[in-house]
Amino acid sequence: MNNFLLAWIVLIPLLSSMTLGLMYLFSIKVIKIPNIVFTVLGLSSPFLSFMIGFSFFLQMIGNHEIFLYKAYRWLSVDGYDIDMGFMADKLSIFMVLFITFVGGLIHIYASGYMKTDKGYGKFFFYFNLFLASMLLLVLADSPIIMFIGWEGVGVCSYFLISYYYEDTKNVQAGNKAFIANRVGDLGFIIAMITMIYYVGSNGFDYINLEAGMQNVPINVLTFIGSALFVGAIGKSAQIPLFVWLPDAMAGPTPVSALIHAATMVTAGVYMVARFHFLYDLIPNVGLIIAYVGAFSALFAAIIATKQTDIKKILAYSTMSQLGYMFIAVGLGGYSVGIFHVFTHAFFKALLFMGAGAVIVALHHEQNIFKMGGMRSKTPIVYFAMLIATLAITGIPPFAGFFSKDEILLTAFSSGEYLIWGIGVLTAILTAYYMFRLLFVVFHGKNYQESRKLHTISKSMIMPLIVLAFGSIVAGFIGIPEILGGNNLVGSWLNDWKNSSLHVEHSREFILMGINILAAVIGTYVAYKKFFNYDMAIVPKYNGIIWKKFYIDEIYDRFIVKKVKEVSIFISYKVDVNFIDMIVMGLSRGFIKSGHFISKVQNANTRFYAFFMLVGISVISTYLIMVMR
Amino acid sequence: MNMPDFIYILPLFFVGVGAISLMILSTFKTITIKKGSVITLLFLLFAFFANVYNLNNEDGVYSIYPFVDIFNKMIIVDTFSGYFSTILILGAILTILIGLHYFQKHKGFTVEFFSLFLFSVFGMMLLVHSNELISAFVSLEIASISLYVMIGFEKVIDKRIEASYRYLVLGSLAGLFFLLGTSFIYAATQTTTLGEIGNMALNTVDSNTPLLIIGGTMILITFLFKIAAFPFQNWALDVYDGAPLPVTAYIAATFKAAIFGFILRLVVVDFDLIIDVWDKILVYIIIFTLAYGSFLAIIQKSLKRMLVASSIVHTGYLLIAFVSISVIGESAASSIIFYLVAYFLSALGAFGLIAYISSADQLRITYDDFRGFAKIRPYMAAMLSIFMLSLAGIPSTIGFIGKFYIFTGAIESGHSILAVVGIIATFISVYYYFKLIAVMYFYRSSEMTDVPPLQGIAPLIIGVIALFIIWGGVGNTLIAYFPGVDFLIDMAKSSYESLFLYG
Amino acid sequence: MADSLLSYIALAMILFSIGFLGVISRKNIFIVYMSIELMLNAINLIFISLGRYYETMVPQVMAMIIIAIAAAEAAVFLSLIVVLYRRKKSLDSDIFTVLSQKDAHE
Amino acid sequence: MDFGILSVIIFLPMFVAFSMLILPVGAKGTRNAAFLTAIIIFILVCMVYYNFQLSGYMQFREHHRWISTYGINYSLGIDGFSLIILMLIATLIPSAYLWLWDGRTKGYWVSMLLIQTGITGTLFSQDLILFYFFWEGMLLPVFMIIGMFGTGNRVFSTIKITVYTIMGSLFMLISILYLGVAFFYEFGSWSFALNDIVQITTLSRTEELWLFAGFMIAFAIKIPLFPFHTWLLETYSNSPTGGVFLLSSIMAKLGVYGIVRFVMPIFPDLYKEFAPYFVWIGIFGLIYFGIAALMQTNIKKMFAYSSASHLGFIVTGIFTLNVYGMTGAAFLIIAHAMATGGLFLLVGKMEYNLGIKAIPALGGIAKKAPVFTVFFGIMLLCIVGLPGTNGFVSEFLIILGTFGFSPSAGVVSALTVLIAASFMFWMFQRAILADNGNDVSQMKDLNFKEIVGMLPLAFLIIAMGVYPDWFFYKIEPTIQHYLVDILEIRNY
């Protein structure tokens, strides 16, 4: 059995990242190492991992085999063992495949995007490290090992977001991301520890946990589930912990593509799916998840309609798509959620890369209203973006359509009409703001013809094409039965399928129609407003939506400021003026009383004699009292 | 005249003869300070060896009344007195050796001074040897009067004579209470000989017990005055401050030992039936003494006054053990004796070193004068730090062991509260002792051109004392045959036992 | 017999107290010295009366010794008074305050 | 190991120190001798570790009568708990010496050597008076090194720390003496050996309470626990690098060690009874100091607060009365010692190059000194408790143990993940990464020696995070022994 290869899926990127890091330090301290070395090393690792993952994929086809590999005993306290173990079931292999695939493409893209950057090697060091952590996250066989990857991606995103660390803003954005994720991790840790005590009495890997879940009081499970979901919220940028995601755009565009499209943000969804055995037992929490997802989707979509920064728009769209995924997994349609993760990975990565290409072309201009007319200049990018936009809006037969349709179907069929409604509304908004972006950027007239465009390298174009192709076909592996397809994803992720839902076909067709209609409506509105948009009049945006509902301000005002005030109060008031006052006050008091007492030392013989007399008389009176 | 008896009083004899002969020699111009001090040293060394001979001569503990027919049990020679006379003579020798440089440097010291010095030593030795109240008073007065004169010897300096005057008035005032107590005790028991007082007190009618208690208390008052315990402590600061530094060291270290030597004998032999009357009052006296000393020592700018004030604190520690006597006689008494040695060494060293480096007009005795001293005279600074640590009772010095015994005894005898008070006083003392170390080491050196370098006998002796302090702190009879801590304690214990051979 | 002893002792105590009060209240060094002598003699009185009471000679001897010591003390005292007077040209004991805690109020 | 290897480990540095003092050797010679000593001791300690049997009981015992009159013994020994701290010391000190290599005077090195003696002696003592000896003796060289080579208002802070800590230890001394007397009254002979003292049965509850308080005050001041922490700030900010390194990474831990070594066996019942209070005090300190650290502008003060907060967490761990918590605490002692020690060394270098600067006056260092920044980042991630560093393992275990002790406490204590991260990363941003236009041109990157010195720490931090189990197996029997035999908790 070649299970140890599982470890290598993680190990290859890890090792290569370590090598890259050391080589980078070496090259800046000692001798300059040519970029090509970094490129080769950095790009090879994801594809090697992909190969290995694919081999496992092939072994899995048709059977329900689960590959386990326990590398070594990670921790063993008081007879309770936790192994550094890897588990490959269909879900994780599915994740591994598209993570490595899309990740690999993004690596290629980055090799072009960062070509001129000084910290080229460092960048790929972070990238590979990130990939390794992500793969560890999905391949872990126990929550705690998963948590290692979980935090690993967190810290990598910190480093990548604050990649241009000279600028304070970027580092602040990184901090924000890390702290917000930490809030989530708090929930994750609490959940893990509760699980260890209540569930993991015999082993802490998923299998034992699943076995142990059965006879645990429901309220405990509810607690665990909610705590875990807090972690998911933090990682996947849902309400209320989403604030870090827009700022995270401070990083280079490939970073945005890798972190916010393909991989990291979907970790939350994956985690919920991974704990499906838990959430199956607590549908109420699942419902909460679905609602949180729905509202996040709507909320993000609304904000996105008024943004002008191209990457911020995409960030908010990511958030709202993640909302969709949470609707699905919350309502038990784990396979559906994962399916959307899959498709979303393609078109969102594509969108980001396209945006990145445009940005590069326009010398790092990010305001869409300063762009325009890119269609003629960068046709390939335009077509790629068009496909991606169609995909995300859910126009058949593009990828997004099938997955989104299934999500809404799930919502509808499980009787949550409100969620379904929100979903449809969001779909309209999605179509609107995505096409708004597309029209403004590519069709809008701009008067800066004179400007010389920066060339876009081949290594940036190639992945676009691949992903565009992917965005078209990715959906086909999930064509529902009624369209004559056989839902490959569904069958592959059979264990994660919510078999309870079923609606008759007529309804299903109607729903499909509604989705398409919604997409069309949104597109039409966008067309009316923004087609051939005249760039001369840059719209003045203001109002609550443009201000993102003041969420950042509110957090800053009511949490950050308060904490800082408390901190100042403690460290400069309480400690200095109260506790230290008591300590030093004692010594000062001693000295003061010393000065007071020393008045007695007045060098007057008669006074001294008198003092003696007093002492003697006191003693004598004492004696008299004793003797009677 | 039988020889062995004479050998027993030989130490006393040597010192006395030395005193008188120096008195005579001082009339000759040819006798310089140096010669005088050498002669003094010779006599003291004779006395010392005679004393050590007596100590080793008898196997185990011994107790003899020499010349019973003449002295009629007024004088006793036993391990106890031998032990104490060793301390006293040693103190005298060290004082002379340390002070030699000082005496030579300062005008106004003549050979008579050494004669007086020997007289005071004689008085103190007689005090620890005396077995009868009046003779104790006599020897006490011999010591005190010669001290009065020694303090005021440099009669051109105001503070000297002022200190002398104050000491004289208050000292004689306190001495009167000793006599008063003696008269009461005589009234109660018709005797003033130790050992008989107790017996008489036991088998006379109890109507006399109050008299005995009052008398004892009067004597206790004198004793408290001499060791500068709380209500009677004011004089100490002035007198010690006014006295020349070697004399200060001598009073603070040696005289205190002598007083304790007598009072221990008195209390242990005779007053064991009334000492528990004093328990409560002594507890208060101790608390006040410790507090007074600590508070006073904290604020001192002058190093000399600080050491004096802290000597009041150490009196408090000694009294803690003194209280415990009523419960745990042996270990308390021996802990007093040990602590006396510890304090005696540390104080003598500290005063002596300051005396050595203080220039002619008594400068360099405030904290600030010692800024950066370590840079100029690292070894002296190290010695001074060792003395400070020992006085503060930091481990690996003899001071810690002494405090250890004192507090252990206090707890053992159920006076835990006193132990706690003592602890508090200790950590206050850490402040003013460590301040000196900080000043010496942590500042850039100020101008200190006229510091005498390490030469002559005095620094050597001080260094030896410092080594002894360290040895007393870590000394271990296992490491070498060289007497360690255990040896000192065993000596103290055996000397205590010797008090019970008669009576 | 006993009550006469008591009256002697009472007298002695009164003298003693007068002496102490003198030490405390009078400024003149000479008078301070005299009061101390007075106290000494008070104690002598006690001893002698005790000797009379117990019909033994021992206390008288003690009194003798005490007188001798008093004489020695007197010598020192008088010489000191001379020195003090030379320094300050005054016999007021309160003006000798070189050694008071000066830095007490800094 | 039939020759007294522990004695050698204790007294070799002292011997070297004094011989250096007496011999006419310059600063360089002293430094080389000190470094050599540290290496030799490291080798000896490795021998000890190698020969250490896998059991919870005292090993390498050395027992001699010292002051027989009062039953004071020279008695040494180590168990698993002291073993890891010993390994820690032996590893940290040579690295530190490599960092302090240049520009230190003779007195500095002598003090460092003496401190080492004090530390190891405290660690080995099995006799209460002997322990007190080293416990106080440790203070003197610290006093010296801070006072002579410190910065700012150093004299004040030295006096303060000395009086403060001696106050604490004097109360402990009273308790020790009381115990000795109690032993004397019960068994009729004097002894202060720990094995004898633990047999005392005659103490009433009130007595025990007072003695317990006496011990705990001493250790609480040393650690420091809230509210005995005010000496920490001045001391840490005014100490020279070496002093603050040893203070923060080792001596503070000795307070915890003292609790485990003496308080737990002598007062097992009170230990169990008061465990909840101390768990909560620790958690409170964790949060309180963590928040206080947030707005500090002096990096050293911030680290002072942060280590106080972590030490509160360690105390929480040792009072959780279960294997997870205590093992985690033992592990956090190592992790935190390495991380904080490393951080203080790095900050010391920063001060050495740039002079003492407030956080806002720094920044842009990452550009000047990449390697410096890399190591800084590793230490920082360890403090933050990132998985893959040993910080995570220990914090996870402590939270686990606390949860087992009381779920509410466990949930609150999980806040540590958030607190440390917030202030640490904020500081990292302002002081190291972001370029605020301040002049940091004087900042130099690490030289070879410094890299060599820092590598072991960084390596261990990561290795212990990736493969913790290998480092655990020698601790755990000891912890089991504590819980089962001493505290008699069988069903935790």
Image: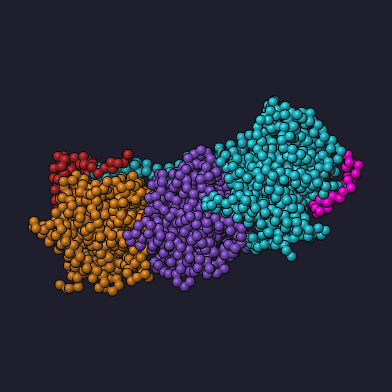
Chain colours: A cyan, B orange, C red, D purple
Residue C3 is situated, as x and y percent measured from the top left of the image, at 24, 52
Q: Write down the quadrant of residue D116 in the picture.
A: bottom left
Q: What residue is shown at x 70% (from left), y 39% (from top)? A: A355
**Image height check: is A275 above or below A354?**
below
Residue D385 is situated, as x and y percent measured from the top left of the image, at 59, 51
Residue B125 is situated, as x and y percent measured from the top left of the image, at 22, 62
Q: Is residue B178 left or right of residue C73?
A: right
Can the viewer see residue A144 in this picture? no
Q: Is residue B2 left or right of residue B199?
A: left
Please report the bounds of the magenta region as a residue range.
Answer: A482-510
Q: Is residue A2 left or right of residue A418?
A: left
Q: Write down the quadrant of residue A404 in the picture.
A: top right
Q: What residue is shown at x 28% (from left), y 60% (from top)? A: B463
Q: What residue is shown at x 60% (from left), y 57% (from top)? A: D465
Say whether residue A483 is magenta: yes
The quadrant of the rendering that contains the N terminus of chain A is: bottom right
Q: What residue is shown at x 55% (from left), y 69% (from top)? A: D53
